[in-house]
Image: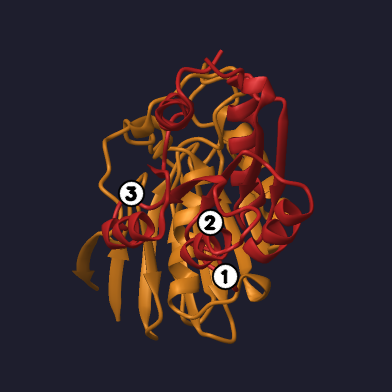
Amino acid sequence: MPAAAAIKVMVVDDQTSMRAMIRRALQDLGFKDVRDKPSAPEALAAVKADRVHLIISDYNMPEMDGLQFLEAVRTDAVIGKTVFIMLTGSSDKEIVQKAAALGVNNYVVKPFAPAALKEKIERVFGELT
Amino acid sequence: MRRVSIVQGENAIVAEPGVVVSTLLGSCVAACLYDPVAKVGGMNHFLLGEPGADQRVSAGDMQRYGVHAMELLINGLMARGAMRTRLKAHLYGGGNIVSGLGGIGTANAAFARRFMADEGIEVAHTDLGGTSARKVEFLPHEGKSRCTKVADRVPDRPPVPVNLPPAGGDLELF
């Protein structure tokens, strides 16, 4: 079982309050190394410079949306295998299908409870300690 | 002129002129956001600001929170051509109408102010707090709003499961 504390996470959402809420939820789940960025280009540069194990990204962002971000991650030779969980709205089924085709590991529909986030992360990493 | 009424957990986004979005508020808060260049705006109506750090909430409960309601509204506005940097806000509600609710209205008003500050959204007008219920009317395309204090107590409706979107609510004619 992986220790949550050992997993480095990048949270990407253009809304400051949402980033803060996700960060808090992750910290409650035992994650110690949680970084965040307000845009996909900033997050992409940051994870290329300092790799993480898990990216949790909103879909709905200006400039570069979650799908474009996922594609940029997956086509990068170095960070291409980083676990990627997408946050979507309830009506975004088409987006989830596109994300699956691009290799997303899982997705979480907003609004979500911390327990749902934990469950989706554990489906990828296994039960967290 | 068309009128769109919203209740707790809903939002309405309007880009057409002459459409009034209205709601009734007690301790809830309504954020009226608009982009004066794109001429699009919208209103939401939320029950609570954000869950406490140690609070366990379900996904259904999360729909009542402002942090989610604000995201839905902002994303909806941006999908209709608004730019986050141009958004202006009018904030209403957050009254402490019912004693014994532990200042929930005050907490909601504080959340709304903090949210706008955190997100860098200019607050053009506020009418928050106090002990009165409010009726709020907003012309999103025009970016104009008005608020009427309601003398008699209008309690917030009990939380109901809400399917979001679509934006808007019952349509009435004046």
- Contact flag, marks 3 and 2 (Cβ < 8 Å): no
| Crowd tier of the residue under label 2, counting other residues whose Cα lies within 10 Å: few below 14, some 14–19, many 20 or above | many
In depth, the one of B112 and A70 nearer the eye is A70
Mark 2 belongs to which subunit? B
- Contact flag, marks 3 and 1 (Cβ < 8 Å): no
User: Marks 3/2: CA distance?
Assistant: 13 Å
Mark 3 belongs to which subunit? B
User: Marks 1/2: CA distance?
Assistant: 27 Å
Q: Which chain is orange?
A: B
- Circle 3: residue type: Val
Report if residue A95 is visible in the image.
yes
Q: Which chain is red?
A: A
User: Marks 3/1: CA distance?
Assistant: 33 Å
Q: Is residue A67 above or below residue B25?
A: below
Expressed as whole percent of the image width and height from the top left, the position of residue A129 reads 56, 12
In this rendering, the label closer to the viewer, 1 or 2: 1
- Circle 1: residue type: Met
In this rendering, the label closer to the viewer, 3 or 1: 1
Task: Check if mark 3 and mark 2 are on a common chain.
Answer: yes
Q: Residue at x 62, y 58 (%)?
A: A14
Q: Which disc number belongs to residue B31? A: 2
Numbered disc 1: secondary structure: loop
Among the 4 quarters of the image, the one containing residue A19: top right
| Crowd tier of the residue under label 3, counting other residues whose Cα lies within 10 Å: few below 14, some 14–19, many 20 or above | many
Task: Check if mark 3 and mark 1 are on a common chain.
Answer: no
Q: Which disc number belongs to residue A64? A: 1
Q: Residue furthest front?
A: A77
> Would residue B49 be found to the left or right of residue A59 on screen?
right
Q: Which disc number belongs to residue B7? A: 3
Q: Residue furthest right?
A: A49
- Circle 2: residue type: Ala
